[in-house]
Image (cartoon, helix red, strand yellow):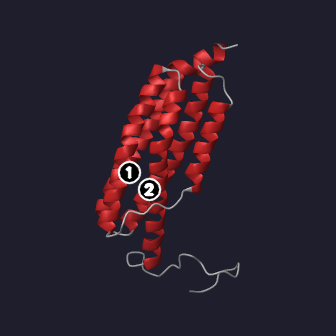
Amino acid sequence: MTKNETGSNPKFAAQTSLQESPAMKELFKDAISDLYWAENHLVKSLPKMISAATSPALKKGIQSHLAETEVHVSRLEQVFDLLGEKAIAKKCDAMEGLTKEAEGIVEGTPPGTATRDVGIILASQKVEHYEIASYGGLHQLALTLGLDEVAALLEQTLGEEKKADQTLSEVAEKDINYKAAQEA
């Protein structure tokens, strides 16, 4: 391994062939472990958002996504199996930060208000956009590495994350934003 400009050894040294690059595969596995932690963390965090939400449509949307998130965890376990690896979670600092921000929004808004629901939607969409970026990037990397079965699983989850983001937008646009604007 060669040292980079900062004088430290790079964690993932690139090879010339992407298809056979151990560094690329290691980077991929590391990112999957990160996402596996993130999805498991969401399984624990989403019930708090459901409890804090007031709108029945928002509660239903988050409950539905919780069920999907449990499936996403299972899919990532399938990815580990396809890679011949044990499913190991690596703490995802980004997801931890996003969920802490969501908790702060809940604590900083009055209970039972549409304003709190708007905050929950904003926080939830930040999470969805992080997941969309993660699944999109990993899907492309799986294709590059010739991991077609893995790519198909990631693409399926990517579609569901995009749909969840759209659902949140629709709930906000059709009702919650207007109610929040009218609150004193």
Kind of residue at disc 1: Val
Check disc 1 and report its element: helix, strand or loop: helix
- Residue 168 in percent (x, y) is at 49, 31
Kind of residue at disc 2: Tyr
Asked if labels 1 and 2 touch by Cβ distance under 8 angstroms, the answer is yes
Whether residue 96 can be seen here: yes
In the rendered image, which residue does mark 2 sit on?
36
In the rendered image, which residue does mark 1 sit on?
73
Against 159, residue 172 (above or below) is: above
Labels 2 and 1: the sequence-earlier one: 2
Check disc 2 and report its element: helix, strand or loop: helix
- Residue 29 in percent (x, y) is at 43, 67
Q: Residues within 10 Å of mark 2 (few under 14, many from 20)?
A: many
Disc 2 versus disc 1: distance between alpha carbons?
A: 6 Å
- Judge by depth and name the residue closer to the eye, 161 or 107: 107
| Residue at point 69%, 30% (across, down) | 108
Whether residue 136 can be seen here: no
Q: Is residue 46 left or right of residue 104?
A: left
- Residue 132 in percent (x, y) is at 48, 48
| Residue at point 33%, 53% (across, down) | 75
Dot label at residue 147: none
Q: Residues within 10 Å of mark 1 (few under 14, many from 20)?
A: some
| Residue at point 66%, 37% (across, down) | 104
